[in-house]
């Protein structure tokens, strides 16, 4: 089930308003309840303040008849207000016994609530003691106030709060959903724009100018992904074309030679020569395939694993000794400078250095010296191979480590080499956490790579 951002935002708005309204409504209800309680207390205190002096003044039963009539007149028909005078002498009592059946003669003065059978809500009463005077004993004077009207006001206010809160929450949810939908309009336009990009045109990009600032970063990132994808597709197309070109030549040779051999009778020696030629072409194809598999593994993040602590000078000397026949043919010398002990993959180091020396020997001035420099700081080492030769344009220098890349000024005799040597050097450097570089200045061309010392902390 798809999740809607607009719905989630609307729900979050509604929950936030629910929390705020609940707190506000609770505070308002508590404030009103406290105000109503204070109002009832004030009314009880007011009636006591008026009647207490009158009760204290009458000290004989003769005057008590008129006092009872006065209290009867002060009692409304609905008995919202009631009076009780509790005393052992019936001549001074009024209102009868308390309706709750409890003994109020021993209670201390103060506010209480009394449940009346005929009332929905309890009655709030204020009890005060009138001291004895003359023939009149001590009195317990109670004024009661029915809390039903006050509680109804509180309940009515509570219902209004609940209704208002519910309507407010619903309205906020609807408005929140509309606001979220409206606010997410640029996202939908961006989505439509992305869906409208033509599938065959890799140059198309999203228009970031009309987008809000919050979405521009997303659109720029998406355009960056499109640019990287375009570069990857271009590289893949070029790679496929180069692979097809490199494999087409040996395949054509194999097919042509085999067809000619089958068309005419051949001696055993001729067939052996043909098989030997076919084997050379097959070995070349096998080398290309193996190199491509190696590069694919390096580009997928494969790291060097067969590590050992070696002396770079000793390993470089072994590589030069292995390539001595190639160097001898062009009467080239090799000078190795520097040394360092590092933890690297010995086999991969030999392979990359051999490719650099072979590349240098291929384009070096005859009877010159190839310089191999080993420099580093313990954490990282750089291997530089320099030869005297024709200068290389900077445009080519940036791409010489790409697979199958050839430049006439930089790579002659491309028919004898399949163009993966420098790419393998870059792969070896990447597997050791390093990089490759190339310079051409003052009549010398320098190719090299760096390696991270795998034993360094």
Image: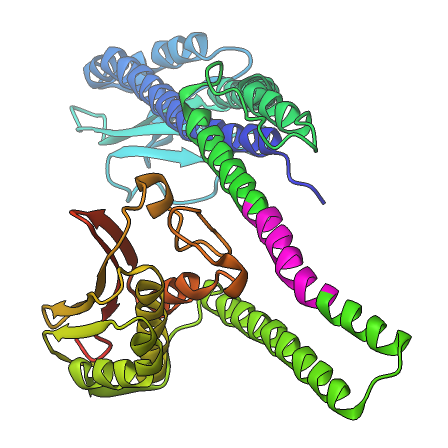
Relative to 337, is 405 above or below? above
The percent coordinates of residue 417 (x first, y second) are 50, 64
Q: Place residue 67 in its image quadrant.
A: top left
Magenta: predominant secondary structure element? helix
Can residue 345 be seen in this snapshot? no
Relative to 322, 209 lies left or right: right
Question: Which quarter of the image is occupied by the N terminus?
Answer: top right
The percent coordinates of residue 378 (x first, y second) are 11, 73
The percent coordinates of residue 145 (x first, y second) are 42, 21
Residue segment shown in magenta: 235-252
Relative to 3, is 171 above or below? above
Q: Place residue 383 in its image quadrant.
A: bottom left
Question: Which quarter of the image is occupied by the C terminus?
Answer: bottom left
- Display colour scheme: rainbow
Relative to 77, is 247 above or below? below
Q: Is residue 341 magenta?
A: no
Q: Nearer the viewer, residue 219 or 25?
A: 219
Q: Nearer the viewer, residue 198 or 270?
A: 270
- State the residue at coordinates (81%, 89%): 267
């Amino acid at each position: 089930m798809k999740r809607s951002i607009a719905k989630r935002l609307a729900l979050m708005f509604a929950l936030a308003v629910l929390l705020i309204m609940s707190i506000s409504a609770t505070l308002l209800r508590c404030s009103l309840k406290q105000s109503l309680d204070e109002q009832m207390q004030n009314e009880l205190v007011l009636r006591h303040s008026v009647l207490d002096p009158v009760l204290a003044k009458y000290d004989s039963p003769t005057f008590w008849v008129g006092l009872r009539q006065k209290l009867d007149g002060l009692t409304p028909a609905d008995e919202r207000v009631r009076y009780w005078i509790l005393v052992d002498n019936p001549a001074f009592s009024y209102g009868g016994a308390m309706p709750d059946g409890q003994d109020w003669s021993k209670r201390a003065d103060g506010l209480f609530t009394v449940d009346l059978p005929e009332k929905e809500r309890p009655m709030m009463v204020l009890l005060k003691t009138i001291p004895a005077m003359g023939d009149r004993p001590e009195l317990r004077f109670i004024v009661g106030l029915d809390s039903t009207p006050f509680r109804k006001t509180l309940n009515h206010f509570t219902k209004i709060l609940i209704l208002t809160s519910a309507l407010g929450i619903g309205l906020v949810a609807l408005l929140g959903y509309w606001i979220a939908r409206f606010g997410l309009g640029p996202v939908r336009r961006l989505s439509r724009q992305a869906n409208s990009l033509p599938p065959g045109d890799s140059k198309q990009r999203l228009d970031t100018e009309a987008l809000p600032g919050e979405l521009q970063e997303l659109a720029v990132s998406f355009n960056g992904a499109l640019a990287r994808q375009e570069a990857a597709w271009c590289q893949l197309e070029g790679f496929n074309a180069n692979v097809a070109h490199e494999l087409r030549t040996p395949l054509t040779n194999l097919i042509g030679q085999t067809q000619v051999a089958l068309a005419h009778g051949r001696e055993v020696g001729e067939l052996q020569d043909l098989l030997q030629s076919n084997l050379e072409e097959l070995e070349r194809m096998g080398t290309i395939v193996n190199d491509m598999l190696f590069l694919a593994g390096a580009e997928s993040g494969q790291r060097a694993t067969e590590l050992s602590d070696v002396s770079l000078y000793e390993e470089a000397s072994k590589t030069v000794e292995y390539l001595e026949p190639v160097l001898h043919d062009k009467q080239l010398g090799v000078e190795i400078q520097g040394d360092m002990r590092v933890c690297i993959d010995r086999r991969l180091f030999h392979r990359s250095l051999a490719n650099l020396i072979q590349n240098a020997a291929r384009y070096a001035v005859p009877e010159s010296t190839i310089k191999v420099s080993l420099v580093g700081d313990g954490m990282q080492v750089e291997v530089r191979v320099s030869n005297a030769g024709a200068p290389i344009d900077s445009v080519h220098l940036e791409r010489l480590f790409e697979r199958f890349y050839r430049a006439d000024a930089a790579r002659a005799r491309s028919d004898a080499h399949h163009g993966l040597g420098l790419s393998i050097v870059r792969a070896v450097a990447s597997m050791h956490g390093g990089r490759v570089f190339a310079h051409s200045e003052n009549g010398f061309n320098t190719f090299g790579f760096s390696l991270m010392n795998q034993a360094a902390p």
